[in-house]
Image (cartoon, grey):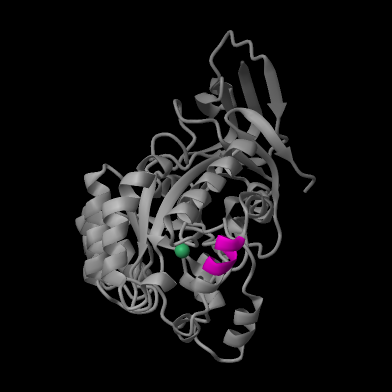
Amino acid sequence: MITLFRHCRIATCDERSQVFERGAVLTRDGVIEWVGEESGLPAGLRPDRTIELAGRWLTPGLVDCHTHLVFAGQRASEFARRTAGASYAEIARAGGGILSTVRATRAASDEELLAQSRPRLQSLLAEGVTTVEIKSGYGLEVATEARMLRVARRLGAEHPVTISATLLAAHAVPPEFTTRADDYVDLVCREWLPALRASCDSVDAYCEDIAFSAAQCDRVFAAARALGLPVRLHAEQLSNVGGSQVAARHGALSCDHLEYATEADAAALARAGTVAVMLPVAFYALAEQQRPPISAFRRQGVPLAVASDCNPGSAPGASLLLAMNMARRLFGLTSAEVLLGVTRHAARALGLDGQRGSIAPGLAADFAVWSIDSPDELGYWAGFNPCSMVVKEGAVVLERNV
Ligand SMILES: [Zn+2]
């Protein structure tokens, strides 16, 4: 099946960040075959189908490279406590925070988890998102961690989306191991990682005073790498405890949050080729004051991505467009940086560079079509979605009237 998408303006987000003002894309069986100015279309072409885009903008399908969207329940009462002055760390130390979602998730059936998570995924898909990373980490017992990964895969099977599943067993110290975090890390390394190796695409950990130390994350990563699994890390969100240096040493795909990262951390990430993932919705919802060192990342040449961080505690919501807006307004990213941050760089953060996240021959034909005058409008609107069509592997999977 050959499909021609024509009469569109195209931002390729490829290595050259090309723009075609009177562009066209040709796809064959879900893969991009050709992209360029329409005047240069290969001669003698007989597409099976032509899709007329009336001058709208076409970008790669967006990639949300950091979410916790599979969970049960919500934490609105904690949000109320935080707006009244309590801190995230105080609530976590009192047994709330992540552990309160762990209790709800353990108690939920697979069907309940699916039913509660589905609308969040669908909210992202309506914004042109065609690839989503989903973490476990609300089980903290091997059966529930496995269940979360299974639910993430089932969501992928029932929607037109590519799911990247991440094992985040080192998210919080489970209640069964209070004061025995090292024993828990031993168990994860020795038994859970080998058991869940085939169920996940990468391994994550939360490196923070209220979670795991840099030395403990180092052990989790060594065990993951020994099994051939790539790693990523929640690092330097609320303080600097040395996580990004550990992540860089293990060649992590991404290092996420990074509000308290230093110039030396940025240099280490650049050397390792690690993507720095900005999560401005969490920064906003926690009313943090410390901004990530964007100028150090730019100086050192660290690729920047932007993600929703969809989770019930620090980033309640399921909008990558809102995260893009906040990355621009709160962190000062440019519109070009946020667009690359949700396309090529986000794909790289998932180890999917060269497969998704750009418009170039040989890549999957995942596109978002926008009713906008310029890509500057991506990350400009807050609470408004200008996505009018989503294409997954060459097939139109969603159309919206905007
Ligand atoms: Zn997270």
In the rendered image, residue 105 lying in the magenta stretch gets the answer yes
- Magenta region: which residues? 102-107
Chief secondary structure of the magenta span? Answer: helix
In the rendered image, residue 154 lying in the magenta stretch gets the answer no
Tell me which residue sits at (41%, 53%) in the image.
167
Tell me which residue sits at (49%, 35%) in the image.
359
Tell me which residue sits at (51%, 66%) in the image.
327
The image quadrant where one finds the N terminus is: top right
Task: Please say whether residue 265 is visible from this viewpoint.
Answer: no
Give coordinates of residue 330: x percent, y percent: 51, 73
Give coordinates of residue 266: x percent, y percent: 27, 65
Q: Is residue 27 above or below residue 358?
A: above
Tell me which residue sits at (32%, 78%) in the image.
179
Give coordinates of residue 286: x percent, y percent: 52, 79
249 or 343, nearer to the observer: 249
Q: Is residue 139 above or below residue 387?
A: below
In the picture provided, is 63 more to the left or to the right than 352?
right
Task: Please say whether residue 80 is visible from this viewpoint.
Answer: yes
Q: Residue furthest bottom?
A: 85
Q: Which image quarter: residue 277?
A: bottom left
230 or 24, nearer to the observer: 230
Q: Residue furthest top?
A: 44
